[in-house]
Amino acid sequence: FTLAFDPADGSRLWSDRYDGPAQGADGALAVAASDDTAYITSESHAANGLFDYVTIAYDVATGDRIWVRRYGARGGRDDLAWDVAVSPDAGHVYVTGASVNRCFATGRTARLQIKPTARNATRTYIVNV
C-alpha cells in the first residue's frame, strides 16, 4: 500500500494498493524519487508461491502507475528486493536484493537496472554475483 502526503499539512494526496499475481503478501520496503516519479520496490508473491522483486513507478502528482516491473530468478529461489535508487539524471533505476533458497543456506545477490523511457521501462541488464 502506497500513500502520498502533502508536506505542508499532512493531508493525503493519493494512495494505491498493489496486488500481485498470486494475490498474496505484497509490501513496500524502499522508495526513491526523481522530480516527477516515485519508485517503490519490495517483494511480492509470484504465482509459483515464491517471492519476486516488484518495482512500481508512480507519477508523483497524480499517483497514476507509470509502470510495474517484476524480477524472478530461475531455479526455485525467493527474490527479495532491499533497496531502490534513481540516477541523478533519472535515466536509470537501480534495485538491489538477493535470490535465496527457502532455507536461506545459500544465496546470491542480484542487482537489477531499469531504464525508464517514454513513460515505460526496459530492463537493461541483471548481474548475479
Image (spheres, helix red, strand yellow):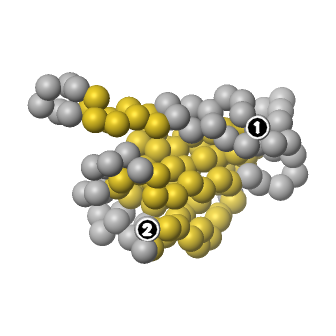
Q: Amino acid at mark 1?
A: Ala
Seen at 85% across and 42% down, the residue is 48
Q: Position of residue 108 (x, y in %)?
A: 72, 49
Looking at the image, residue 94 lies above or below residue 61: below
Q: Which of the labelled discs sits on residue 119, or is there none? A: 2
**Residue annotated with mark 1:** 22
Mark 2 or mark 1: name the one nearer the start of the chain: 1
Q: Secondary structure at mark 2?
A: loop
Q: Which of the pair 110/122 is nearer the observer? A: 122
The residue most toward the left is 8
69 relative to 116 in the view: left or right: right
Q: Which of the pair 73/108 is nearer the observer? A: 73
Q: Amino acid at mark 2?
A: Arg
The residue most toward the top is 10
Q: Position of residue 122 (x, y in %)?
A: 56, 71
Q: Position of residue 92 (x, y in %)?
A: 43, 67
Q: Position of residue 100 (x, y in %)?
A: 76, 41
Q: Which of the pair 60/103 is nearer the observer? A: 60
Q: Quadrant of the C terminus?
A: bottom right
Q: Residues within 10 Å of mark 2 (few under 14, many from 20)?
A: few
Seen at 64% across and 46% down, the residue is 53
Q: Which of the labelled discs sits on residue 11, or is there none? A: none
Q: Secondary structure at mark 1?
A: loop
